[in-house]
């Protein structure tokens, strides 16, 4: 799993909080989590990265929120079996997970499966 404590729904999607310039309530394992109605969900930042912070190869902001992008590109790379932009942004899709890599759910397009909370 990318982050210890992240939750995966019954449809094999990681439950996340996604905002531009997102902030977290707590950091666990170097990753930000937001408390939403008593549930801590993984924080993701939709802004393009401007700082040089990385955690396990993924680009994060100063609050531990993972920088993400929804589009794939021919220059993408794979980090821990997950597709990332050349800038280190995790490629995500709000779709049902159909397989797993290293405990992380993947969509039918082989990108990180998420659901917004």
Image (spheres, helix red, strand yellow):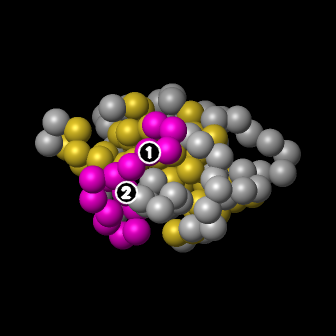
* Location of residue 96 in the rendering, given as x and y in whole percent from the top left corner: 47, 30
Using the image, determine if residue 4 lies above or below residue 48. below
**Residue located at (63% from left, 41% from top):** 69
Q: Label 1: which residue?
A: 22
* Secondary structure beneath label 2: strand
Q: Label 2: which residue?
A: 32
* CA distance for labels 1 and 2: 9 Å
* Secondary structure beneath label 1: loop
Magenta stretch bounds? 19-33
Quadrant position of the C terminus in the picture = top left
Q: Mark 1 Cα within 10 Å, few/some/many (few <14, many 20+)? A: many
* Location of residue 66 in the rendering, given as x and y in whole percent from the top left corner: 51, 53
In the image, is 55 to the left or to the right of 88? left
**Residue located at (59% from left, 43% from top):** 47
Q: Mark 2 Cα within 10 Å, few/some/many (few <14, many 20+)? A: many
Image marks 1 and 2: residues in contact by CB distance under 8 Å: yes
Q: Is residue 91 visible?
A: no
Q: Is residue 10 visible?
A: yes
| Count of picture labels | 2
Upstream in sequence: badge 1 or badge 2: 1
Q: Closer to the camera, 80 or 54? A: 54
Magenta stretch contains residue 26: yes
* Location of residue 44 in the rendering, given as x and y in whole percent from the top left corner: 47, 46
Farthest residue to the right: give it: 74
Q: Closer to the camera, 37 or 113? A: 37
């Amino acid at each position: 799993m990318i982050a210890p404590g992240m939750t995966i729904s019954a449809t094999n999607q990681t439950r996340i909080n996604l905002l531009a310039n997102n902030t977290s309530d707590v950091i666990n394992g170097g990753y930000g989590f937001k408390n939403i109605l008593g549930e801590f969900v993984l924080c993701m930042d939709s802004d393009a990265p401007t700082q040089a912070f990385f955690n396990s190869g993924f680009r994060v902001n100063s609050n531990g929120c993972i920088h993400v992008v929804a589009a794939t590109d021919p220059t993408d790379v794979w980090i821990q079996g997950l597709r990332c932009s050349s800038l280190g942004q995790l490629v995500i899709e709000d779709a049902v997970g159909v397989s797993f890599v290293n405990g992380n759910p993947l969509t039918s397009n082989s990108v990180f499966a998420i659901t917004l909370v």
